[in-house]
Image (cartoon, rainbow, N blue to C red):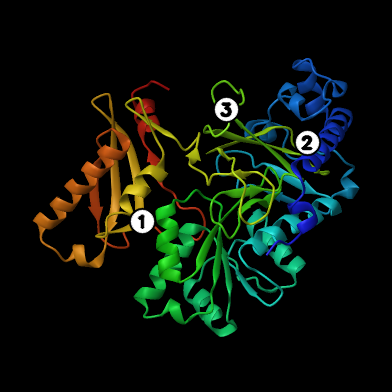
Amino acid sequence: MIWNPEQETLSRDELSRQQSENLKRLVRNVYDNVPFYRNRMAEHGVRPDDIRGLADIVKLPFTTKNDMREVYPLGLLAVDREKILEVHTSSGTTGKPVVDAYTARDLDIWSEGMARTLSMGGCTAADTVQNAYGYGLFTGGLGVHYGARRIGANILPISGGNTRRQLEVMQDFGSTILTCTPSYALYIAEFAAENGIDMAQMKLKSAMLGAEPWSESMRAEIENRLHVKAYDIYGLTEIIGPGVASECEAQNGLHVFEDHFYPEIINPESGEPVQPGEKGELVITTITKEGTPILRYRTRDISFFIEEKCPCGRTARKIHRLLGRTDDMLIVRGVNIFPSQVEHVLLRIESVKPHYQLIVDRRNKLDYLEVQVEMNDELFSDEIKELEATESLIERELHSELNIHAKVKLLNPKSIPRSEGKAKRVIDRRQIVDKQEGKI
């Protein structure tokens, strides 16, 4: 189902015309009303009149998360504070949070983006949406809520956690759409299996999952265990929240809602645009945002454009589902490693569960990678030699995938902490070691 056919099936020429006009309007707005951007543009030797169309976007400065933290709380505000109706922030676990401030029009755009997103997963006014994203300053919960309300669907604003209650509500109210993180969806499936709850008897048909990278292997696991079609959704607090891009029924790449968010893929080292189909860092400009508009935000997410037309009929460009993040990427003995690569290997091994952590350390001045993964119940009851054989198998598979040796450590079931939100996949102890040795 296409929620807004008029905009979602625009010709590329008409879409480009709209984008160009909105970009010029945005640049003039931030130059006139946001001192941060006026100063940054002056540093780059660019003025609003230099931006005549989309091709000129490369003249504009990038914005980073650190930039947004430095102007906390409202240094990027482009309207009078009286026009701000709502504010959301990131968690701020690694420093000052980033702030997104919404006007009435911004909230309307957000609702529209999430209505498109949920519609891509088959949501209609006849559906019941069980919203297990967190409500509050985090954008996930209210973003889904606004989109479901725009569609006219029934909303169960249960938020995250209390998994037994989640399953009771799912059964009692006949939830048809589940929204949460992929790792929490897996935990719900695991909890159900351990407590004798048959997910095939639920009325769920779709799971709209986001807020963390996840692999095709994890999708297959979730779809099999929850008996749903699982769709990848994408958004960032810095941009608007969820509702920036989403998979359609083809489940082959995420349509970016380009009439509001202009995407680029750049080389993360040079900052230059990459060739069509080449992997790089996703950059987004909020070409219609009013409250806190953003120029060329470096998301740190790795993806690439999918160039072929989509059979769903939508004309917005698609990005491949996230391959990882530049700031989550590990460099171990000179090799670039993403957690998603490890997950891809582990989900091929039937005797382990999809719960793992990467522990990176430094021993004798050399990087050391250990992959800790939970056994399933059958392997847990096996003899030592079977455990050793499984560890060796995973180590060989990881070496083939990563081109580096990783030590595998099998853990008892339930050893790795479960998360209601984003799973913590990496523990990098090298900085601690360096500090102890006086290198930092």
Gap between marks 3 and 2 measured at Cα: 32 Å
Q: At numbered mark 1, what does the secondary structure look like: helix, strand or loop?
A: strand
Q: Is residue 149 above or below residue 202?
A: above
- Quadrant showing the C terminus: top left
10 Å crowding of disc 2: few (<14), some (14-19), many (20+): many
Return the x and y of residue 137 as percentages of the image width and height: 67, 54
* Circle 3: residue type: Gln
Numbered label attached to residue 166? none
Q: Which residue is mark 2?
A: 76
Gap between marks 1 and 2 measured at Cα: 39 Å
Numbered label attached to residue 355? 1
Return the x and y of residue 403 as percentages of the image width and height: 29, 33
Disc nearest the viewer among 1 and 2: 1
Numbered label attached to residue 275? 3
In the rendered image, is residue 283 in sight? yes
Which label's residue is closer to the chain start, 1 or 3? Answer: 3
10 Å crowding of disc 3: few (<14), some (14-19), many (20+): few
Gap between marks 1 and 3 measured at Cα: 36 Å
